[in-house]
Image (tube, grey):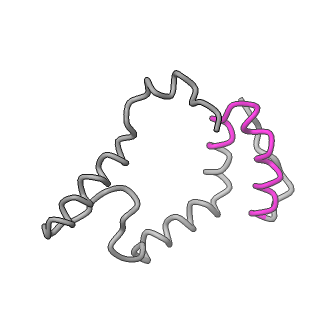
Amino acid sequence: MPEEFYRIKRLPPYVFTEVNGLKAKARAAGRDVIDLGMGNPDGPTPPHIVAKLVEAVQNPELMAILYRAASPACAAPVPPIIRAASGSSSTPKAR
């Protein structure tokens, strides 16, 4: 088995691994743990939030703002995506 790269040993512990370990210990001890952490929703996204997200994604003006703010390397694939999503033949202008 190859030896670990020496710098790996100098990295601090990953915070979520540490938190998950603490939660597991608390649960194993019979304690009630309410997890308000990242990625642990207690239900589906409310419909009004989904509707606003869909509205924003379908708004070509908002997509143009994102496109103009992007770096050239990130912005290059955006025009085809906007055209496909909006059915438009226009391309937003980059700054």
How many numbered circles are shown?
0
Quick check: 19 left or right of 49?
A: left
Q: How far across and how far down the image is residue 71, in percent?
A: 69, 31
Residue 23 placement: quadrant? bottom left
At a point 65% along the width and 50% down the height, the residue shown is 63
Q: How far across and how far down the image is residue 58, in percent?
A: 64, 63
At a point 76% along the width and 44% down the height, the residue shown is 92
Q: How far across and how far down the image is residue 72, in percent?
A: 75, 31
Quick check: 29 left or right of 91?
A: left
| Front residue of 19 and 67 | 19
Q: Residue furthest right?
A: 89
At a point 41% along the width and 76% down the height, the residue shown is 44
| Front residue of 21 and 94 | 21
Q: How far across and how far down the image is residue 25, in percent?
A: 22, 58
Image quadrant in which the C terminus is located: top right
Depicted 91 relative to depicted 33: above or below: above
Depicted 45 relative to depicted 79: above or below: below
Majority SS type along the magenta span: helix
Look at the image and say whether residue 79 sits in the magenta stretch: yes
Image quadrant in which the N terminus is located: top right
Depicted 18 relative to depicted 86: above or below: above
| Front residue of 20 and 75 | 20
Look at the image and say whether residue 80 sits in the magenta stretch: yes
Quick check: 80 left or right of 69?
A: right
In the image, the segment drawn in magenta is: 66-86
Residue 14 placement: quadrant? top left
Depicted 26 relative to depicted 90: above or below: below
